[in-house]
Amino acid sequence: MRKFLLTITTALVFTAMLAAQPQHFEVKQVDFDSIKAGVSDVRSKHYYPLLMEKYLSNDTLLGYDDYRYLYYGYTFQDDFDPFRVSEYADVIDELYYKKEFTRAECDTIIKYAELTLRDNIFDLSQMKFYIFALKKKQKNTLAAIRQYKLNHIVAAILSSGSGTKEKPWVVISPAHEYNLINILGYVATGHQELDNNIDYITVEKKDKNSPEGFYFDATRIKQVVEEKYPEN
């Protein structure tokens, strides 16, 4: 129930934030060749070490296009692993089911969320829990910055398609498929691997007009696995 409540809260905050600000991102195909060139060129404003430095410094001036390069450009970094799971990720899992939290428990969530994000910087689940704990501790400025980051990462994924078979969302981690569905307020009910590296996740319908599922393009994930782990 706690995970469900956190999911709904994040979905509402995300929707409200996007509604409150201009939509500067457009839905367009992810050009990985262009992104690789941008994040690898020291003269580019999207040079990856520079982007990451700004991201880690809590720079809220990075825009939607910057986050596309940040998110998809991560796949060209030496330490990228699409299946990375932090050793800290499950340490406090039982806390997420509680109805009330003490300040000490919020401190525990913050501590291990920070440790997890140092190891897996795009762990969207830990980002949500981190924001939740910061708000409970009334650290609203830091929570707002973290919410900005999460919203823009989600926007980067949303800008890659429409979640349809014709225009699937492009992800860099299988976990992000479920993260995005949860953030949008849906509950996953099934998973299918289709041709051309397309994943299809069915969801509980909200109403008669809501979709029965969403499509994701995992091509880049497969490419990285083949490059880094050819023996598998």
Image (spheres, grey):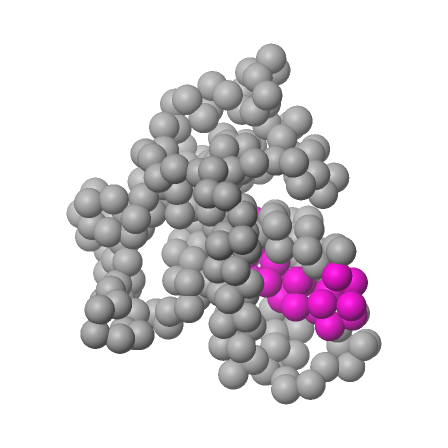
Q: Is residue 114 above or below residue 39?
A: below
* Residue 6 in view here: yes
Given residues 199 and 51, the one toward you in this image is: 51
Magenta segment: 122-140
Q: Is residue 131 above or below residue 20?
A: below
Q: Is residue 109 left or right of residue 11?
A: right
**Count of numbered circles on the image:** 0
Q: Main secondary structure of the magenta part?
A: helix
- Which percent across, then down, holds residue 34? 41, 22
Residue 203 covered by magenta stretch = no
Residue beneath the point at 48% across and 59% down: 15
Q: Is residue 213 left or right of residue 88?
A: left
- Which percent across, then down, holds residue 36? 46, 24
Residue beneath the point at 35% across and 39% down: 27
The residue sitting at the top extreme is 43
Q: Is residue 101 left or right of residue 220?
A: right
Residue 126 covered by magenta stretch = yes
- Which percent across, then down, holds residue 116? 66, 56
Residue beneath the point at 49% across and 72% down: 8
- Which percent across, then down, holds residue 23? 46, 43
Q: Quadrant of residue 109?
A: bottom right
* Residue 70 in view here: no
Say which quadrant the C terminus sits in.
top left
Residue beneath the point at 36% across and 28% down: 31
The residue sitting at the right extreme is 104
Q: Quadrant of residue 2?
A: bottom right
Q: Is residue 62 left or right of residue 206?
A: right
